[in-house]
Amino acid sequence: MSLQEDINGVKQEIDNEEKFLSAFVKTEKFVKKYKILVVSLVSVAVLGGIGYKAYGYYEEHRIIGANEAYSKLMKNPNDKDALAALKAKSSHLYDAFVFQSSLKDGNKAGLDGATLSKNRVIADMATYESALASANIDKLSAYGSNKESIYKDLALFVVANKHIEKGDYKKARETLNKIPATSELKEYASYLFHSIVTLN
């Protein structure tokens, strides 16, 4: 019985070794057959990881550089090097700075330039401020007629006041009626409308 057990144990070990060798041979054939694909996949994964880390480092470095340039411009708005660095590192922050400084200085050309910003909010605010600075009723009316405009109701309110200054009460009332009931300015628009309703 002991001899039989020993023989069975040896057979089991030989079977296990055969299975291992068989699996090893199959793996070796698979690796040889798909060697290029496996190496390519591993290479892509490694390069992708390196690229991801490098891009993260680049973005962090770019943001830090943009913040440093913006800080320098806050201390000295005439720093040409900081302005150029800000433009290169962050076009949105550059547009915000140009808009802010143009508004502060009353720089009409700067405001007009900011209307072309790729940042929709800055472009919209600059368009409103530019129209307001020009005191051009047509520009303000065009801005107020655009459904996408952020300050459209305020622009219409200003246009109505401009019409009142000119004595054109009919156009003022028409403009005030364009301000929707949901607007926070509607209460003021209604008050202004009622104060001129009896005027021709």
Image: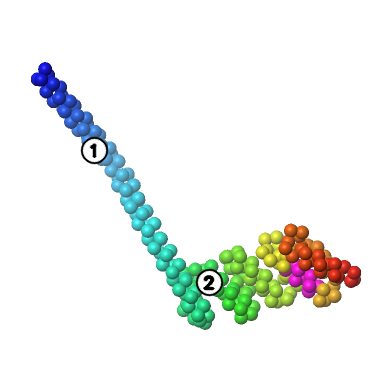
Residue at disc 1, secondary structure: helix
Q: Position of residue 25 (x, y in %)?
A: 22, 34
- Picture layout, residue 76 above or below residue 113: below
Please give the name of the residue rendered at 73% of the width and 61% of the height, measured from the top-left corner.
Answer: 183
Q: Which residues are magenta?
A: 155-163
Taking the view exactly as shown, the residue that stands out farthest to the top is 1
Please tell me whether residue 159 belongs to the stretch shown in magenta.
Answer: yes
Q: Which of labels 2 and 1 is toward the front?
A: 2
Please give the name of the residue rendered at 33% of the width and 52% of the height, measured from the top-left corner.
Answer: 46
The residues tagged by marks 2 and 1 sit, at their Cα atoms, a distance apart of 58 Å
- Picture layout, residue 174 above or below residue 31: below
- Colour convention: rainbow
- Hey, which quadrant is residue 3 in on the image? top left
Viewer can see residue 129: yes
Q: Position of residue 33 (x, y in %)?
A: 28, 39
Label at residue 98: none
Please give the name of the residue rendered at 81% of the width and 65% of the height, measured from the top-left corner.
Answer: 190
- Hey, which quadrant is residue 143 in on the image? bottom right
- Hey, which quadrant is residue 145 in on the image? bottom right
Residue on which disc 1 sits? 28
Please tell me whether residue 21 belongs to the stretch shown in magenta.
Answer: no
Viewport quadrant of the N terminus? top left
Please give the name of the residue rendered at 60% of the width and 64% of the height, measured from the top-left corner.
Answer: 120
User: Type of residue at label 1?
Assistant: Glu
Residue at disc 2, secondary structure: helix
Does residue 38 appear to the left or right of 150 in the view shown? left
Q: Position of residue 35 (x, y in %)?
A: 28, 43
Label at residue 94: 2
What secondary structure is the magenta-colored segment mainly? helix
Say whether marks 2 and 1 touch (CB < 8 Å). no
